[in-house]
Image (cartoon, helix red, strand yellow):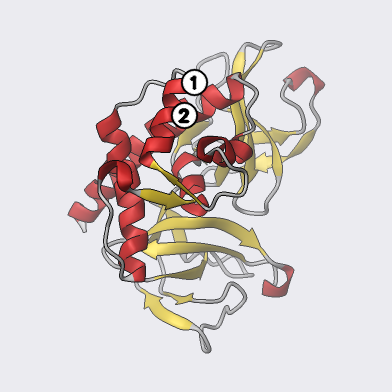
Amino acid sequence: MLALRRDFAEFETLRMEFAAKFRASCEAKGIRVEESFGQVAGDPIADKVSTLQLTAFLAKHSISFESDKLEKLIKRLAGRKSEENGEAIANGSDAKITKDDFSRLIRVFYKVVKDIVVSDHLNIDKSGQIRRLEVGEVLEALQGPMLDTSVNCYRVQGKALKDGVVGWITVAGNQGITFLLPGGSNFKVCKPVPLTGDLKDLSGDSSLVQTLKESDLLEVIEWSRTSSSAMGVTRIRVRVLGGQATGWASVADSDGNKYLDVS
């Protein structure tokens, strides 16, 4: 388990370095992050991109990232997909990843380390409060960090895991207080829970993949969704570290009993 955790931590450190540089460059040049896949592929309807295409995009936009690190990231993502499909694993610049895996590559997550308000505007002095984020919550960055010049602090626009709320959140205050830290892409099972093949199947009776046991480590594949048909229970699609099992699991039940926690 320790080796799995260390291996994932190394991969995440590398991935986060790439994601931060890639997103910052795109935002600075007015390229929407959600549209960057088509720009990298040179085709808005492409279904895959290669290491060579990514390398060319980095060079064109003066993004500094070592080629061996990039190949390592792409090979790992492409290799997992090939293993799942029983295909040969491509090496080096021949490796290609899907649009979904590209999205995973450039995603940035934050975990809340001190309670902070979500507001509806980048600038705090123009903001209205939406709700308060509590310690332990996780959010996916949509934009930023961007500087709020009115108070001289950096803020991100993010989407909260708990309920899908979107708004602006301060990363660290101008007095040195930290509210958000990078993290939230892997979870630990704190109470046994079904892993199912269907988002809506909470019982696990009809599409049970396996029962997750306490201390299992999970990598987020597809970010959480809260479905009205699932009684508002937050579900995320994950991969069990150390194996190939993937599926949907509930973060907590409708009564607030927690099954998964940020690792």
Q: What element carries label 2?
A: helix
* x and y, in percent, of residue 216 in the image: 32, 65
Name the residue rendered at 67%, 10% in the picture: 149
Q: In this view, does 228 lie above or below 46?
A: below
* x and y, in percent, of residue 143 in the image: 62, 31
* x and y, in percent, of residue 189 in the image: 39, 64
- Image-quadrant location for residue 182: top left
| Quadrant of the rendering where the N terminus is positioned | bottom left
Name the residue rendered at 34%, 72% in the picture: 213
Out of 133 and 26, give the one closest to the viewer: 26
Q: What element carries label 1?
A: loop
Residue type at mark 2 is Phe
Q: Mark 1 points at which residue?
A: 61
Instruction: State the residue lying farthest toward the bottom.
Output: 206
Badge 1 local density, few (<14 within 10 Å), some, or many (20+)? few
Q: Indicate which disc residue 251 carries.
A: none
Name the residue rendered at 23%, 47% in the picture: 6
Name the residue rendered at 68%, 40% in the picture: 132
> Quick check: can you spot residue 221?
yes
Q: Name the residue under label 2.
A: 57
Q: How far apart are marks 2 and 1 (CA)?
A: 6 Å
Residue type at mark 1 is His
